[in-house]
Each structure stands twice: as structure tokens, then as C-alpha cells.
Amino acid sequence: MKILLATLGSRGDNEPFRALALEASSAGHEVFFAHTLDLAADPKAPYTDLVLPGRISDVIADQGVSPVKALLSYRSVMKPLMDGILDASTEHILQIKPDVVVYHPKVLTAATAAHSVGAIALRAEMVPMLNPTAEFAPVGMPSWIPASWNKASYRLVNASMNAFNGKAKKLADLLGVRQTEPDISLIPVSPTLISRPLDWPEDVVMTGAWHTPQHRELDEELAQFLEFGPVLYAGFGSMKDSHGERRADTIVQAARSLGMRVLLVTGWGGLEPSALHESAPDVLIRESVSHSEVLPHCTVAIHHGGSGTLHAMVRAGVPSVIMPFLGDQPWWADHLHRQGLGPNSVSAKTKDYRQVAAALEEAIGLTDVVQVASLAMASEDGLAEAVRVMEEAEAGVHPFRAL
């Protein structure tokens, strides 16, 4: 079977697709993986890299994650970037003519292009936000809305997506395609964190998370740092704003008040350690680390609450505090707290180290609960489930068995 995967975004958008590319390749399928320059191509990979133009990381570096700045620069920055990405991904699909296309929701033209060459289109949502359910509200809705509004609130999310869907509509007219929606929705989320809603149709499949452990040998300094005393992991992935220096200082103060050492993982700029942090014996700074190798040595973590990072924390049995910035992060923070797996979120703009310290103490008190969830998550194989769905879809097998 010929499979084309298309994604764009931050590490949390790219890594799950790379994991799926490796899994599908190992199952004997011919895999093409289209992604932006944010993810380095791997010449040794068993799949074929298809590089899409541009870097999302460059946009974040220039304007941070401010929604206001994003809207103001949409026509001059984001629209040209997205147009190039959508044109390139469409061209790849039309040339390769895959049997199956799995795509990130932001690749708006993928389903249309897939159907034009007779391929099955599977949309992969990193967090459930487009398939209505009465059991929870979608990303972007405030946590206080009545449960009776849950299902109806998905109309607002789908309407906002349709507002940016003009290119897909033009492509459908050009190619003579009538079906522009996906055939199947894949939700690469752990059922340990979210139970599959009973009112979802059978073509919405919660596979479990897409994850491949990244075994990177720890450098000697990092290994020694993790060995002695309780360690707080602090990292905000692809998030960046104007509060990175203050945030780093607040977190270091909170860790010290609890007698902890702190590993500051700077990522794309959500933490900006000062010269004092760089020389402090109880602080270690890294741009990125392997979650698989580092987290098992940490007592507690503080992070932005992206889906991939959150899954990594629970998978490792590490309790955590979420400082959400935008997007799905407040949704995950609220959901984790409701599940009893984490404290209330803390503002990413807070200057009060005592508030951060109190949240960390509360999270540490939930260690046993998080470790039980970790054991449950260990029995899941989201990648194998996703490949099975693709194989059955291509073979015309229905319905799809959901976890």
C-alpha cells in the first residue's frame, strides 16, 4: 500500500506523524512523509521525506505565539506560507497518487487532493476538536459552558475552519471533486486520558497516541545532574512570548523553595534563562532533551500542556503542572484537572513563585495516581491501531473497531 502523510506545525504536530511513518514503513508499506523544514529530513529513514516550503519556527521566533500578532500578520506572513505549503502538498499527492492520505487538519486541501486521485483520506486530530460529541466541548470553548452546549459548540469550531477553507473549495472546483471531507477521522489520543465518546460514529477512531521512544544517550553533565536530588523538569516546547526570562526566574525560585534542582529546556523560547541561571549549580539548561530518557529521572514537571508533551509526562509517570499559552493547552489543563491527574493550571504570565511552588507540591501529591495512568497507557499501541485502520480502509473493510 502506498501511504502519504502530510503535517505542519510544531514538534507536537510533526513527531506523531514521523512515528506513524516509521510504523507504517516497518509494516511493509511504501510511505511518503511531507513536512515543513521544522523537522529535519532523515536520509536513513525507511520512508521518503517530502519537504514542504517554509518554517513555522521562523514565524514563532519572529512574533511569538500571540494570536493578535498572528491575525495582524496573516496576509503578509501566514497566508503566503500556508499557500506554499498547501500547493506543495497538493502537488505531492497528485504526482504520487497514494492509496491512502493521512493529514493534519491544517493541511486543508489534503482530502480534496486525495479524492481526486482515488485515495482514502484520513484526518488526524492531535486533540478531538472537529467531531461533535455531547460528552465534552471542543478546544477553544471556555470550561464554564454548560454541558448541554457541548455538541452545539462544535459548529463554531467547524465554522472557523471553513473560514480558511477557500483554497480547498477552489481546488475542488478545479479538480472536479465533490467530496472534500475526510473518509475517516483518527484521534491519536490515549483512551487513558480521554474515554472515547459513545456518540461518535464508527468512522471516528481513537487509536491511542502515536509515539516512538527517542533513545538518545544522556551527556555526562546531564546524567550527573539528574542523579542527585529531586529534579523539576521545565519546558514549553514551541511556545514563545515576551515573558520567557521572567518565567524562567519564577520557576527557578519555586524549585529552590521546594529544595529541588531544575532542568530548564528552552525549546523555541518559552524559557530564557539569565546568566545567573547559567552559572548556578542547581540549574541545568538544555535546548531540547529526549523525554523518553530524561523524564523517568524527574520528580515533577511544568510545561505548556501540548498534547505530545502531556502524553509524555503521563507515559513516564511524572506528575505535572500546566502553564497553558493557547490552542488546545487550556483544554488539556482543564481536562487533566477534572480527571484528577493534575492541579489547576497556572498562568504563563505569573510572577509569583509561591503560586508555582504550591501547584508543584499539589502535583507531587498526585504521583501515585499518575503512575497508575502510566501503567494503563503502557498497554496501548496507537501506531499499530492507526496502521490497522489504514489497511482495513484500503481493503474496504467496515466498520472500524474503536478502542
Image (cartoon, grey):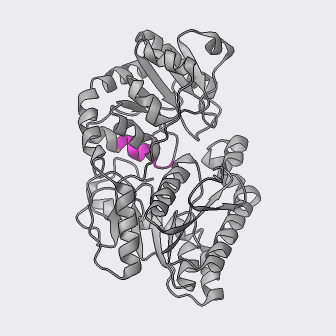
Query: Magenta includes 328?
Result: yes
- Towards the viewer: 260 or 67: 260
Q: Is residue 131 visible?
A: no
The residue depicted at 30 percent of the width and 47 percent of the height is: 193
> In which quarter of the view is residue 65 placed?
top right
Q: Position of residue 127 (x, y in %)?
A: 42, 55
Q: Is residue 378 visible?
A: yes
Instruction: Name the quarter where the C terminus is drawn.
Output: bottom left
Figure check: 297 above or below 27: above
- Towards the viewer: 315 or 270: 315
Q: Which residues are magenta?
A: 327-334
Figure check: 170 above or below 30: below
Q: Main secondary structure of the magenta part?
A: helix
The residue depicted at 35 percent of the width and 39 percent of the height is: 315
Q: Position of residue 304 (x, y in %)?
A: 49, 37
The residue depicted at 45 percent of the width and 45 percent of the height is: 308
Figure check: 389 above or below 18: below
Query: Magenta includes 120?
Result: no
> In which quarter of the view is residue 389 placed?
bottom left
Q: Position of residue 402 (x, y in %)?
A: 27, 65
Q: Using residue 357 as the reference point, say whether residue 110 is left or right of it.
A: right
- Towards the viewer: 373 or 248: 373
Q: Position of residue 20 (x, y in %)?
A: 47, 58
The residue depicted at 52 percent of the width and 88 percent of the height is: 178
